[in-house]
Image (spheres, grey):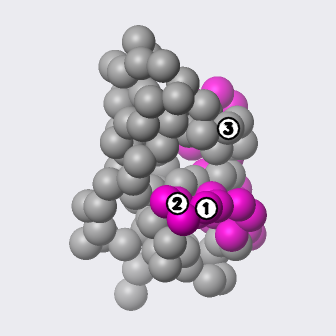
């Protein structure tokens, strides 16, 4: 059985990948869509999401927020706080929030 800590750490790992994608594509306009990786906690997920740089930076403003495909949210460790037809923004809760915040690059 996967623990809450393992699920949260998987999401923070994909957040780091998306941070690298964002830094490599920082020359694109804020209105151009870029491909990001779903930051859900499903080990089998490798799906991509279309977001603008502005949308992604809005999500990244909080260490407990992650961008996931609709339907990829997981009750018990997160709640949906925003979204549209292309993606959802989930907020970690409880122990998962503590882990996500501790692993947040801007928090260290």
Q: Is residue 64 visible?
A: yes
Q: Quadrant of residue 105?
A: top right
Asked if residue 59 is positioned above or below residue 28 in the image, the reply reads: below
Task: Check the image and name the residue furthest to the top.
Answer: 27
Q: Is residue 96 magenta?
A: yes
Location of residue 82 in the rendering, given as x and y in whole percent from the top left corner: 71, 60
State the separation of the CA atoms marked 1 and 3.
14 Å
State the separation of the CA atoms marked 3 and 2.
13 Å
Q: Which mark is residue 84?
A: 1
Q: Nearer the viewer, residue 33 or 74?
A: 33
Q: Is residue 92 visible?
A: no
Q: Which residue is mark 2?
A: 87
Asked if residue 45 is positioned above or below residue 35 in the image, the reply reads: below
- Residue at 34% across, 19% down: 24
Q: Which residue is mark 3?
A: 58
Q: Earlier in the sequence, mark 1 or mark 3?
A: 3
Location of residue 37 in the rendering, given as x and y in whole percent from the top left corner: 35, 50
Location of residue 54 in the rendering, given as x and y in whole percent from the top left corner: 60, 31
Asked if residue 51 is positioned above or below residue 70 in the image, the reply reads: above
**Segment tinted magenta in the rendering:** 80-108
Q: Nearer the viewer, residue 46 or 30?
A: 30
- Crowd tier of the residue under label 2, counting other residues whose Cα lies within 10 Å: few below 14, some 14–19, many 20 or above: some
SS of the residue at dot 3? helix
Labels 1 and 2 touching (C-beta < 8 A): yes
State the separation of the CA atoms marked 1 and 2.
6 Å
- Crowd tier of the residue under label 1, counting other residues whose Cα lies within 10 Å: few below 14, some 14–19, many 20 or above: few
Residue 45 is left or right of residue 52, and the answer is: left
Q: Nearer the viewer, mark 1 or mark 3?
A: 1
């Amino acid at each position: 059985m996967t623990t809450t800590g393992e699920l949260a750490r998987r999401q923070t790992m994909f957040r780091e990948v998306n941070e690298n994608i964002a830094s490599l594509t920082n020359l694109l306009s804020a209105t151009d869509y870029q491909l990001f990786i779903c930051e859900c906690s499903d080990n089998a997920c490798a799906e991509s999401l279309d977001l603008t740089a502005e949308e992604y930076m809005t999500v990244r403003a909080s260490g407990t927020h992650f961008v996931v495909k609709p339907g990829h949210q997981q009750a018990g460790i997160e709640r949906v706080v925003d979204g549209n037809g292309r993606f959802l923004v989930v907020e970690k809760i409880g122990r998962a929030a503590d882990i996500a915040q501790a692993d947040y690059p801007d928090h260290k």
